[in-house]
Image (spheres, coloured by chain):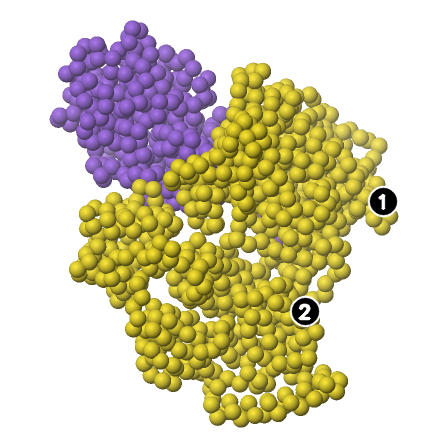
Amino acid sequence: MLSILSGSDSSRSYCDARSRRSFLKLGGLTFGTTSLGLADLYRAEAAQGKGSSHKAVIQIFLGGGPPHQDMWEIKTEAPSEIRGEFHPIPTNVPGIQICEVFPKLAGMMDKSVVIRSIIGCKDRHDSFQCMSGWLQEDLRSIGGRPSIGASVTKLRGQVDPSVPAFVGLAEKSSHVQWSDCGGPGFLGASYSAFRPDGPGLDNMKLNGLTLERLQDRKQLLISLDRLRRDIDTSGIMAGMDSFNARAIDVLTSSKLVDALDLSKEDPSIVARYGDGKPYQYQYDGVATRNDHLLVARRLIEAGVRVVSLSFGRWDSHGKNFDLVRDHGGKLDQSLSALIEDLSQRGMLDDVSIVVWGEFGRTPKINANAGRDHWSQVSCAYMAGGGIRAGQAIGATNRLGEHAVERPVHVQEVLATLYHNLGINVSNTTLVDPTGRPQYLVDREPLRELM
Amino acid sequence: MPTVMRDCNFFSSEPMANATRRRASPRLAESGRNVVSVPERRTYVVTANAIGLAPCRFRKACFSAIVLFFVMSTVVSAANNRPNPLTPAENTLRFESFDSQPVVLLGSDARRQCLVSETSSDGLMLDRTRSVTYRCKEPDIVECDATGYIKPLRDGQVTLIAKDASGLEVTLQIEVRQWANDPAVSFSNQVVPIFTKLGCNSGGCHGKAAGQNGFKLSLLGFEPREDFIHLVKESRGRRISPAVPDQSLLLAKTINAIPHGGGQRLEKDSHEYRLIRRWISQGMIYGDENAATVASLQIVPDQRRMRPMTSQQISVFATYSNGIVEDVTRTVQFESNDLDMAEVTNSGLVSIKDLAGQVAVMARYQGQVATFRAAVPLVGEMHDWPEATNAVDVAVIEQLRRLNIPMSELCDDPTFLRRATLDLAGRLPTLDEVRSFLADTTNDKRDAVIDRLLASEDYADNFANKWMLILRNRRDKPTQQSGTFAFYRWIRQSLADNRPYNQFVRGIVTASGAIDMHPPVAWYRNVSDTNSRVEDSAQLFLGQRIQCARCHHHPFEKWSQVDHARLSAFFSLVRSKPGLTPDEPTIYSEVGKPTTPHPKNGQPLEPAGLDGPVIAMANEQDPRHALVDWMVEPSNPYFARSLANRYWKHFFGRGLVEPEDDLRVTNPASNPELLDALANHFVASQFDLKELIRFICRSKVYQLSSQANASNIRDRKCHSRFYPKRMSAEVLLDAIDHATLSTTTFDEMPDQTRAVCLPDTAFNSYFLTLFGRPQASTACECERTTESTLAQSLQLANSKELQAKLAADQARPAQLANDLQRSDNEKIDELYLVIFARLALDEEKRISIDYLNDKTDKKSAFEDLVWALMNSKEFVFNH
């Protein structure tokens, strides 16, 4: 495949190092920085197969609580000890201005929505509320509320039998709640996320076995495994049999392991996302893993429905502005790469992205040039999933203390995600262990985004 | 001796005299014999057999008199075309009526669901309600539709005639009175049930806490006073138009004349619509405060033997506190407890599908519940039944006999040894145990195995694991370790000493003091607020899930908020103060009066057990002792039953009541007689847990094979065979270690600690979490998941952990490979004895030896063999 940018055909090149013939041959399908030729496009489409048509969600959790007044709504009319160091920059949607640390995202405001008035947050450092919409106390006695990933796994099942429906990417942090990708709640451990670390991932690669030996073992098992299946009244035997078969599939051709392997991705795309290094301000939180956003896209192509990851440690009790410059710049790079990537692959309408944290931060800057916890209002950034993009919803008061315009509850955001997945929250229930049907969330999706 | 048979009066429980029962015809015996103390309908049936068996002179005199009466009544009935109560057995089509004729309908709202049935030649009562045609002899007094539902049209007396396809007719006398007398519609008794029936006040719509679109009703109609205020007074009374009732929002929205989010719930001019309209036009009266409330509910018929793919119409009667009885068939809510077996429509037609077994249909109305039980026997020839060993066998065999489901054979010795060792001791039997058991020729060797296992330390380990998880022995911080370990040791020691269960529960519920001296205080540390303590105790020790009743009347049970409050009063004085360390508080019960505020009006409520008397306590008494006293009384219906059910589930994989801690009227046991037998035995033995286990394990039912025959393959609840169950996570890990001769190490525990012996939940084992070991966050055994997942299969098939166990130099495959003394034959036998507790079949030996001979690397060949055996279902399942 000939890349316009490769300039290899120099013998017949004109001054701009391209020949007309090569341009025509290609069909001109190489835009921007991704070298996607027609053949590749067809191949990619075929490879996606079912995957490209399934709806998915990427939850990007900004652990620690990002400062809402330094992200998507600079409080220009507030005094300097509240406004801080940042200036707003215009975006490609007239009338919406976001923080100057997000120049690339400003260029794609027309594909996204910023919500500046998230309410209902609990002043607690964990991802539970962002992942499920509820607090941990809710239904604790029967196991707690399931996160969106677990609910979707239960309601929709897997797209591909050898690919789990719910994957949590964040590596375990010291403060474990920041790397919590969302638990199964009362649905039980079988609906936990697949976490590609430790034993879960190890088991998907052959451990000290050759494929041939595995096949031998499988044959031996089939000939010796004689217990009648129909005597089982619980259905577990049938389940084990079917998963045993799939396990062999996974070991012989692992779509999932490939999706997690970035060496299989085009290096220029990997470079576009960046790697988020050097990791700064990490302490007991999660690093700024730009590459995880790329892995998320690959996982969705492989058939995962909900990918949940954590990005950075935004708990800026000190050095707030340096932290936001660092984390914000990296988020800008990787998130804009993700949105652009999805958009070019035609996946943006199927994949909903939400970027938010557990609460906002204090308007008044403290003595360490930082901001403290502020759960009265928070913010969120959404893209994809077929929402009506190019909007800024809600507003806080002059000093950024509370929401004055269109307060949006945390559960409304989750309801919107469910809606984008094709799940109607007003009539979908999950049966809990006591036999009682439970609704997913208690609120309706945001009308402005429909 | 009367030869005219009269069954029990519907409302009384007089059993028939034994003598008359023996003389009953086969038809009647069927409905009478196996039913103990169930009220039956009154019917008049002549038994030709009874007459024929009359030997003595006195009876012969009666016989002649009867014959004379018989002849005369036949003549009379032929003239009047009435059902002759003395006709011979052939004419068995009849109206089932629980009260005497004429049936009285009072007022224009009264209704009656008729039941017409016929007795088949094999003794089953078949429902003919919808297969007969109805007509009235006198016109315009009642209207009877094709389903036998009668509605009065005006005062008068009428004869309803039902005619079946063959032309046979039966009649029913009906009288309508006070039709024109428009009684005041009672809001709570007539209007609110409509909302419940239509689902308006369900948790999905207006019944939820926030209401729906600004209109809130109390959940399932438990607070009619509040509903009245919401409907009539709220929002300046805009929901009702007294002047033009049809234009009321209440009615217009219900029929969707005005857009209604819930859609159309009623047809215009339906009975419910007209009732609500009448209520409005009468001035929206609430009704008498002391108006009659529903005291009880009965279903007629309340049980039946039925064939598969047939249906039965049931009718429901409500008895009010003022004695009035009303047919409420179309206003109650019906629910089947097993949709695979039976479905029920809104009008009470129960349709049985094609599975054999027992199924219950519940009717719920105004907080009362009644149950209809259908037994669907297997069609086919009658089977033989083995002799019962003990009361467990008696109850199970009785049910199987009634349902005509054959029992499987007893299991063979290897299966029994493996099953008992897994269930009692939580491990696989050792090679020596297997060899000596198989060689043993004594008659009672199985009983000896049970006794040996019960006396072993492994029994205490296994059951301590079970109990400590539901007693929430969680370690969240390292500093809690001494407490959790102490609690575990206390539990284990109680089981090893066979402490009576009532003392065990008392030790936990009344725990006070510091954790080092009184380890059960750890339960109070983990279950840290009063509501959780109440709900956990109720769930664990009484099998009642009363969580719902905290906020509103329990939707499926009869527990109200007051019941929940009274139960929590026992715990209302429990306090904690800092103990030796900040993480181990000292628990005590304060001196004072234990009360809980009434959830609605704040009045102090004194403690009372569920359905128990209010207990007045002196200030210095620990009210928790009173709670335990109430629990352990032999007459307490929940304590022994819930433990018996829990232990039944441990051995059989399925409780008699499922879920095992949810015993309620609307969730009947699959075999109530068996549950009673277990509970009674348990109480009689002074709550001896080992004795209960012995009672269960010595029965034939426990020792049945899991192999099914064609007839009982579909039985899932009647225990005609053993249902295989997957080994729990801990037992599976230990079994793998046993099979491969390896060990798993756990943090901070001595080497050789088995997974089943782990004292709390803080051990990070991917394997254990993967296979469902609970985190002890709840009191429910359902927290342990047994579902299969892809990750489990990958773990068993391919994990590093398993590979290491297989490939270790000291592991069994290596040992077998390096053993040059013995033949492959002997080695295979040993492998099968270790893993399956049996010898290999010839076929299996052939396959294994072929495989071994095929490979040059003997060690890896044995690894493959052991791998294959461990991945087979026979290993992973306790069958």
Residue furthest top as drawn:
A367
Q: State the separation of the CA atoms marked 2 and 1.
A: 37 Å
Residue furthest front as drawn:
B618
Looking at the picture, how far across and down is residue B42, in whole percent? 55, 73
Taking the spot 29% from the left edge, 6% from the top edge, the residue there is A367
Taking the spot 58% from the left edge, 38% from the top edge, the residue there is B627
Subunit bearing disc 1? B
Whether residue A169 is visible here, answered yes or no, is: yes
Looking at the image, residue A290 lies above or below residue B77? above
Which hue belongs to chain B?
yellow
Q: Which mark is residue A116?
A: none
Q: Which residue is mark 2?
A: B382
Which hue belongs to chain A?
purple
Q: Amino acid at mark 1?
A: Ala
Left of A142 or right of it: where is B498? right
Looking at the picture, how far across and down is residue B813, in whole percent? 72, 31
Looking at the image, residue B591 lies above or below residue A315? below
Taking the spot 33% from the left edge, 12% from the top edge, the residue there is A317
Q: Closer to the camera, A3 or B236?
A: B236
Looking at the image, residue A366 lies above or below residue A151? above
Looking at the picture, how far across and down is residue B704, in whole percent? 71, 53
Could you say which quadrant of the image residue A36 lies in? top left
Q: Which mark is residue B439?
A: 1
Secondary element under disc 2, as helix, strand or loop, is loop
Subunit bearing disc 2? B
Left of B364 or right of it: where is B49? right
Q: Closer to the camera, B131 or B29?
A: B29
Crowd band around label 1 with a 10 angstrom C-alpha radius: few (<14), some (14–19), many (20+):
few
Looking at the picture, how far across and down is residue B781, in whole percent? 57, 39
Q: Closer to the camera, B86 or A166?
A: B86
Of circles 2 and 1, the one toward us is 2
